[in-house]
Image (tube, rainbow, N blue to C red):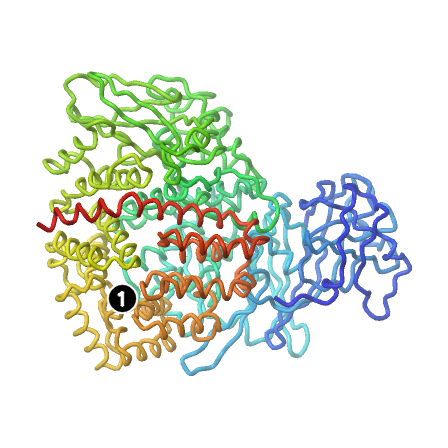
Amino acid sequence: MVLLKTLVLCVLHLCLVGSQPTSKKTSTPPHPVGEQSPLGPDNLSFPWSRLRLPRYINPLHYDLLLHPNLTSLSFNGSVQIQIDVQNNTNWVVLHSKGLNITKATILDQNLAHLSDQVLPVLYNPSHEQIGIFSPRVLTSGQKYFLYIEFAAKLAEGFYGLYKSSYRTSTGETRSLASSHFEPTSARMAFPCFDEPSFKAKFTVRIRRNPEFISLSNMPVVKTVHFNDDLLEDHFDVSVKMSTYLVAFVVCDFKSVTATTSSGVQVSIYAAPEKIQQTHYALEVAVKMLDFYEEYFNINYPLPKQDLIAIPDFQSGAMENWGLTTYRETSLLFDPLTSSVSDKLWVTMVIGHELAHQWFGNLVTMVWWNDIWLNEGFARYMEFTSVEATYPDLKVEEYLLHTCFAAVGLDSLNSSRAISSPAEDPTQINEMFDTVSYEKGACVLHMLRHFLTEDVFQSGIVRYLRKYSYTNAHNQDLWDSLANTCAEEDFISGRHCYSSSQASKNAYLFAGEHLDLTAMMNTWTLQKGIPLVRVKRAGSRLLLRQERFLRTVLPSDPLWSTVQQGFLWHIPLTYKTDASSTIHRHLMTTLTDSINIGEEVSWVKVNSDMTGYYVVHYEDSGWDEMTNLLRKNHTALSYKDRTQLIHNAFQLVTAGHLPLSKALDLIGYLGLENHTVPLLQGLGYLEFFYRMVEKLNESDLTRNLGVYILRFFRAVIDKQTWSNSGSVSERRLRSEVLSLACHLHDPPCVERARQSFKDWLQSNGTLNLPTDVAETVYSVGAQGDHGWALLLHTYNISLSAAQKNTILFALTCSTDTNKLHRLLELGLEGKVIRSQDLSSLILMVAKNPQGHHLAWNFVKKNWDTLVKRFQLGSSCIRHILVGTTGQFSSPEELTEVQLFFESIKEQASQLRATQIVLDNVQKNVRWVQRNLETLRLWLNEQMK
């Protein structure tokens, strides 16, 4: 990123908090030529020392003018901010990053200048703040206008107002400008009060060349000729919103449009040659908006909703109010090249971003420590909305894996609480993680089942209505859920369901009084996930809870320390063979017991995994589960079967269960007909295979591969090389055939080679079945000619989905020179875009031949990666965790520790570095404790 000289020259001095200057000095950039200030800025000091802005000035309205120049790749603009002053002060402190401030003035309510001189602007670069000094005191209770002119280069990377480009089928490169402000980058596009609680209205004007269009949050109300070369679009005034939701795009894209049942205009924008790939997204967006308006019983408040596919985009999508932005893979769907998984992904991402139009945009968290109120809800509403609008996609089959991902992180000692402190931009960026998204969604899923659907939904509606256009805390949500019908205006109507389900201040759950705040605080204010130990004692079920950890064993000296002080209020559910009833019990103490009756032969706790906790069946409990699955596995739901498999292998890693017991448990899978438990069991065997193939354990690797192919032979053989069947069947086909070919299964490899040969003979014009295209390309990429043609096809393809499929196949090559070339192409950012570099690195790391190549690439290019993606970003986290994810030797652990020591200043700022170390230590311990057990178990199976 290019910094302007004026910012580089600034020196930071931290001063006493307050609205008056202190004796310390800070330098200011020189004023533009001809605008000398006699106010003596060199004698002024920056008036504010905190990261968060002072609360005594509040923005009310921004009048913003921008001119992004796609020739010079720069922009200039002005902003007039109406502010409400609540303390007497000479200073206005707000955010600005990388902007060259050329003019700053303050006007009174009558638009009269308070000073006839140019006002001094002081910079605090480390806090990304500027201070503007007024020689006349701004009076408490009065409103003023702050006017600022500024300029900057379009940003490199993916934040602020940044440059993007795409290439046409004729090879022409075309440019566009797009914005991405969440969480703290609006300040890179215009000076502003860039914190979520400073909500204001925005009136935007954008200047552009006639060959482009401009988009913002609101519709264009008029377009005027600014001069012979430029048009100026005037957008309608926005609703009250946070700065991170403001958005602009200047491009030459085309669109398709439809209208919802309530009259909202929905448009999908994409590069002109990709407009045919937008029709599915349009259908989904209209359906989703209709669904959410009914579910929330609150009309979408804007007249339009634009969705646009940006060629360069770091995250999956962004919920800017009225102008949601997406990666091309998250919005575009090409029936010829996009798989059923791609279709589900597009549907879920649109559901996520449109849920944000209520959760996040209409009601926003007060501060980033509660970002889960945005992201956890939006992630959960993906499942709710897609299940309602596209039931054939079977999205509910993916919710378990969302929760399993949360357990994976939450069972490390380096996890964090859902609501955690975050102050500086790096810390705030790190909040966009598995805990906020996946754990947040799973805790909400548990709460919904605990309270019942109607009570949960009516409480959400109350929350959204009460806090519309404002900000909320955790506690506000609990109060809304626990007081669903407390106010007269909520007693009638669709959003309040029945007094028998919702009372004013409390719920009765299984006959027990519930303090919802106390319960939910145990899930949001402390880190980790509980383990519930279950033991039969006659007619009673004995329960004990503790913190579930995979990084500290019960035999470790640290065990008692890491367990101290943890207690959850757990909404237990369980089922027995005695009836089909799902029983409920709220566990609020470390130990507890339930009467289940003498006649019960088995009990399954955490029905359908609606609760966010792991279960350990002590004594002979796991043997009972294994026998049940072998004799009558359909006595349990597919979700229960999947959860048993997951919990068993997690308990192995945590040292609570022998590996042989977990492997015996999945012995029933030969009888399994449901995709989800099949893939869960297969997934663990694949993980073990990929781990041992990197350990130079050739005999063990070969034996495990032979066992997997033999055990799943019937499943493999019944797969067709087509796109036929249900969504679940197609997902199984893709996963099973991919693994079979990776394990060098002769029939699989031969069929893939033939299909690839057919594709080659068509010169790449044959459309392979999307369910098996990745497998076919991966086998074909082993030859030099096939690899070269795939790279060429990647370069010219107009389908982002196909490019993703081909890129993975290219990284499956066993030629390390080819893998190295791919990494260099990703770093260069032309053939392989920078946005795909982090995914590329992880793909290479998955390859046994690319295992250490990827890690060495990260170490060598660390500074470049941080500059490109930002230190606390999800990309940097995924790169670190992903490249080391299967390190499992003490030597590899030492190597990681040494690298983190070499970047100590940056590593100390990242939670991700501790997650990496926890993960590698966990893997090292797993190998030390289980590798021999795996070897012996396999030898027994191979007899």
Residue 608 at x, y percent in the picture: 27, 36
Does residue 224 appear left or right of residue 788 in this picture?
A: right
User: As displayed, is residue 561 above or below residue 681?
Assistant: above
The answer to whether residue 843 is above or below residue 561 is below
Q: Is residue 726 left or right of residue 72?
A: left
The answer to which image quadrant residue 344 occupies is bottom left
Does the image show residue 494?
A: no
Left or right of 496: which side holds 770? left
SS type, badge 1: helix
Is 230 above or below relative to 295?
Answer: below
In the figure, residue 735 lies in which quadrant?
bottom left
Q: Quadrant of residue 813?
A: bottom left
The quarter of the picture where the N terminus appears is bottom right
Position of residue 6 relative to residue 300, above or below, is below
833 or 63: which is nearer to us?
833
Q: Nearer the viewer, residue 124 or 189?
A: 124
Q: Residue furthest right?
A: 38
Residue at horizontal 37 percent and vertical 73 percent from the top: 798
Q: Tell me how many marks there are.
A: 1
Q: x%, y% of residue 537?
A: 22, 18
Residue type at the position of mark 1: Glu
Expressed as whole percent of the image width and height from the top left, the position of residue 750 reads 15, 70
Can see residue 224? yes
Percent position of residue 787, x then y = 30, 76
- Residue for point 53% across, 32% down: 476
- Say which residue label 1 marks: 774
